[in-house]
Structures are given as structure tokens and as C-alpha cells.
Image (spheres, rainbow, N blue to C red):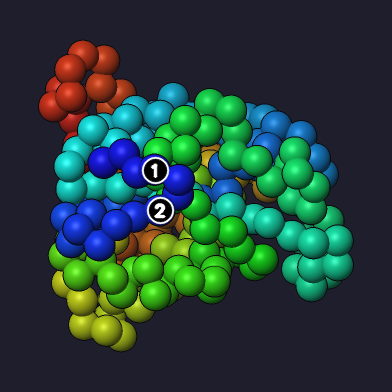
Amino acid sequence: MKLENNQIREEELERVEEAVFVIDMINGFVKFGSLAAPSIMRVVPFQQEILEESENKPNSINVFGDDDHGNNAREFLTYGSHANNDEEKKVIYELERYKASGLEFKKNSVNLMLAPGFISFLDKLKNLKKVYIMGCLSEVCVSRFTYTINEYFDETNRDVEVCVYANGIDTNNAPGHNADEVTETSLQDMKMNGVKVLKRTRKLNKVGDGINENI
């Protein structure tokens, strides 16, 4: 469904059965800045397709979780300075229209679950049945959120299936840090911890074509 002004009404909350979460697809991780990895753009066409489908479903919403740091964020002690200026904090242009018709939560840590208001929002989705997760970085922000939301549903005994799209997440390449290998290891760890890992071909025709498969 399409939302307005980054807000969701009570009657819309009741309709939500699926949510697509997009983690940290901001300029500072993808296009420019000390932690940017332009190679992550390779997963964007698939993300666009999933977001488009979700936007056109009456029972699904798109939710963006994005880093938003001040100049003295404690997290910089571990990861270095990033996402602390207006341009780096912005969702990449290619996904901006989906954020504009969805929800956005700003976070000051790697884990979207800790963002102000997020758990309260999640608790209001009484009819939620499935979540789908995409974004970057595979082994940090994506993994932390995926584990925590899955564990939260365990703790609260909510029957919600947590899924991550294998071809919707990515990370950076660096010496001793191969993006494909790191992502694959992260996916296998998630799978071992009760998360459903999905890989799907691009849908080239109408919605409903293509293949979903467990991997």
C-alpha cells in the first residue's frame, strides 16, 4: 500500500499482513563516503521490483531503516565516521520514491530494532504474518536486524515468518572481505537460526511471473 507523509493510519495498520524492510540503502553505504561500496548497486533492480510489488498490494507496506548519526556517535569508535551529513543520510535516488510512499525509521546504531518507536510500531501490526528483508551491509546491519526481529517474535510468541532475500542484500568488497562470500556466510547463519532465505528470479513480465525458491 502507498502511505502519505511517512505516516500510517489505524485502519491501515489493521490491514498489514506483510512488511518489506529495507536496511541502510543510503548514499553513505552505497554511493559516496568512507563506508560506501558502489558495487551494492547491483542488487537495486531486484529491490525495486520487490518494493513495487509491495506498494501495489493492499496488505503490504515498505519500511526503511536508515543510519542517521550526529558528529559524535558512539558507533564511530567501531565503524568510523559515516552517515553524519545530510547527503550521506539520504536513501539512494533509485529507491527514494518507495521511501516516499512508505515509512522510514532513523537509527543511531546498526540495529533497526533499537530505533526510537520501532518496537511500538511493530506491536501495532496485529495481523502481520510475514516480513521480507533486504539491504546492506549483509553481515552487520542486515544480520543484526534479522536476528533480533526473529528473536522478538520468539519472545512474544508471534507467528510471523521472517524471510530475507538472498539477492536483495549485499556488502562491501575489501582485502580479505569478499562480498559474495561474506553475504553467503551471513545467509547460512541466518538460515541456521530460523530465518527463511529466499532467492527469486527477476520478474520480467506481469506481477505473478517468476520463481520463488527456498535456498
Q: Which mark is residue 7?
A: 2
Residue 40 locus on image (x, y percent) = 59, 34
The residues bearing labels 1 and 2 have C-alpha atoms spaced at a distance of 6 Å
Left or right of residue 168: residue 180: right
Is disc 1 placed on a helix, strand or loop? loop
Residue 163 in view here: no
Q: Residue at x 52, y 58 (%)?
A: 105
Q: Which residue lies furthest to the bottom in this view?
A: 155
Q: Which residue is drawn at 74% across and 60% down?
A: 69
Q: What is the three-letter code of the residue carrying label 2?
A: Gln
Residue 56 locus on image (x, y percent) = 23, 33
Q: What is the three-letter code of the residue carrying label 1?
A: Glu
Contact (Cβ within 8 Å) of mark 1 with mark 2: yes
Left or right of residue 42: residue 87: right
Image-quadrant location for residue 5: top left
Q: Residue at x 40, y 53 (%)?
A: 7
Q: In this view, does 21 lie above or below 46?
A: below
